[in-house]
Image (cartoon, rainbow, N blue to C red):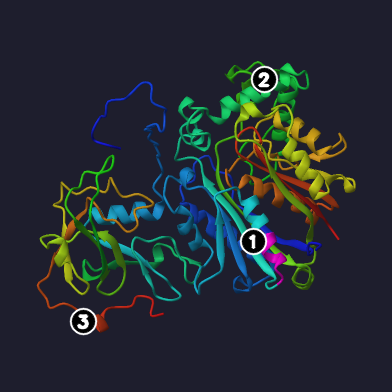
Amino acid sequence: MAAQDIAIIGYAQSPSWRAADLTEPQFLFPVISEAIERAGIDRRDLGFTCAGSCDYLSGQTFAFVMNLEAVGAWPPISESHVEMDGAWALYEAWVRLQHGDIDTVLAFGSGKSSPGTPSEIYPLQMDPYTITPLGADPVSLAALQARAMLDAGIATERSFAEVAARSRRSAIGNPYAQVSGEFDVDALLAEPYVTAPLRRHDLPPISDGATAVVLATAEKAKEVCERPVWIRGIDHRIEAHQPGMRDLTTSASTRLAGEKAGVGDAPVDVAELSATFTHQEPLLRTALGLGDDVEVNPSGGALAANPVMAVGLSRIAEAARQISEHGKHRAVAHATSGQCLQQNLICVMEGD
Amino acid sequence: MSDTTEAIDPDAPVTGMDYFMSLHYREQICPVVERFSAELMEGRITGHKCPQCGLVYVPPRGYCPICVVETTEADEIVANDRGVVTNYTVVTPVAYYGQEATDPFAKVSIYLDGGGSLSLQDVLDVPADEVRVGLRVQAVWAPLGERTVDDIGNRSWGSAEGAIQGWHPTGEPDVAREDLPNQGGF
């Protein structure tokens, strides 16, 4: 059975803060209200809500329950939660719309990375017997991946720095970005390593933030939205948990998800990729078959703002913005989960 | 975690492993909780009263999740430090790593006279098995000088720990179940 046409009819993001002084429900509150308002619907029209967040990140069990206060959960609503980036919440919301009995859904993602210590928290998502006790943190694992790419001759440290400089330049003027500005590639390369071969500019910032997206069926979208952004394909794939069992210089799951979502079926104007480390951008470009003519991360991407659990959904929102506000026709958004691009989601969108 | 150390046979197959770890979080107190804490230090329990539905939130959250409206200092009220136990849980401690309690203890929810409620409170001088719904209680404030709000965070779920030592029965007759407040009126 062919999937029903679903459109993005509203989206909103919070700024990306290094350390928000508000609680997660407090900064989610205006983001959700804005997304609903931009969608031109009433909150009570929502047939389903799905959230993405991580209790380990918040340091509180059932933190996701408090986040629901920002939705307005009375009278009781139909909702679900994924312990994943909000992009996967959007996927569940998209699936829910396929049932055909409701016409409008809300997906959101939120996270506060600032209170915890990433190098303590992230090893907990690894194999608890062999890798967690090693304290394998994301920067170390990303450095192994970057090293594998250098050794394979498919990238250079300069090419990494060029990604950083371009992303930061693109982020100028993006009100949601945390890191932006003009940077000289030679100057960046003169900086010391954080974890060789990665320098500070190769790493994402630590961010707090939230993103919300409203989806609707074709009929509802045409009724309430002037410029709906159509989801033409969405797919996610996962690879082995053990980084040592994968070829880290490529991303088989991204390639497969891209094929299933139909990335190559027509020319792509713009892509928003969750490359949280500079070396992952060329890797993802190759896996998706995006040529040099495709504009990548006009928002600055995850290197400019990295609110974990919202950053993937932000890519979908930013890609949708390129269509609804900047006149682009076809856009690709990518979200990732796990270490070294273990799991990847691809969403292909088009304007009318 | 077991309290006993068993002799380990080096030749036996490995069937499990202990891995102890701790996570450290340091979170900035949000402005509404900061103000709530400052008021507690002065001996006042404060909350926000929703300008739309009138529900009182203690501590203030900065919004009413029912009406989905933001609340501000303009909506602040001083709540009563007397109230009635509306619910309770008796916790029977089991030995696990970090558990210091050994005897059963009660944690109660208290609806404050006039509106607002606090949860996870201690009732003083009442055995755990005599704690009950309808019990009238009043706050026992820590003396000035000993009062702290160091343990109150953004996620304290209504705690006033350090400022209020617990709640003492007032000696008034219990509130009958049918007369208990139903905060929402739903």
SS under mark 2: helix
Magenta stretch in the rendered image: A94-100
- Chain letter for the residue marked with disc 2 in the picture: A
Q: Is the residue A159 above or below the residue A234 in the image?
A: above
In depth, the one of B22 and A45 nearer the eye is: B22
User: What residue lies at 23% left-to-right and 47% top-to-bottom?
Assistant: B148
Q: Is the residue B18 above or below the residue A346 in the image?
A: above
In depth, the one of B18 and B108 nearer the eye is: B18
Q: Is the residue A153 above or below the residue A224 in the image?
A: above
- State whether discs 2 and 3 lie on one chain: no
Kind of residue indicated by mark 2? Arg
Q: Is the residue A77 above or below the residue A285 in the image?
A: below
- State whether discs 2 and 1 lie on one chain: yes
Residue at image mark 1:
A35
In this figure, what is the number of numbered marks?
A: 3
- State whether discs 3 and 1 lie on one chain: no
> Which circle marks residue B176 in the picture?
3
Q: Reading the chain from its start, which is encountered first: label 2 or label 1?
A: 1
Q: Which percent across, then down, holds residue B79? A: 27, 67
A28 left or right, relative to A219: left
Q: Which percent across, then down, holds residue A192? A: 59, 16
In space, the residues marked 3 and 1 are separated at their CA atoms by 46 Å
In space, the residues marked 2 and 1 are separated at their CA atoms by 40 Å
In depth, the one of A204 and B148 nearer the eye is: A204
> Which circle marks residue B71 in the picture?
none
Residue at image mark 2:
A147
Of the two numbered discs 2 and 1 in the rendering, the one whose residue sits closer to the viewer: 2
Kind of residue indicated by mark 3? Ala
Packing grade of label 2 (10 A; few <14, some 14-19, many >=20) is many
Kind of residue indicated by mark 1? Ala
Q: Pick the quarter of the image with the C terminus of chain A.
A: bottom right
Q: Which percent across, then down, holds residue B152? A: 31, 50
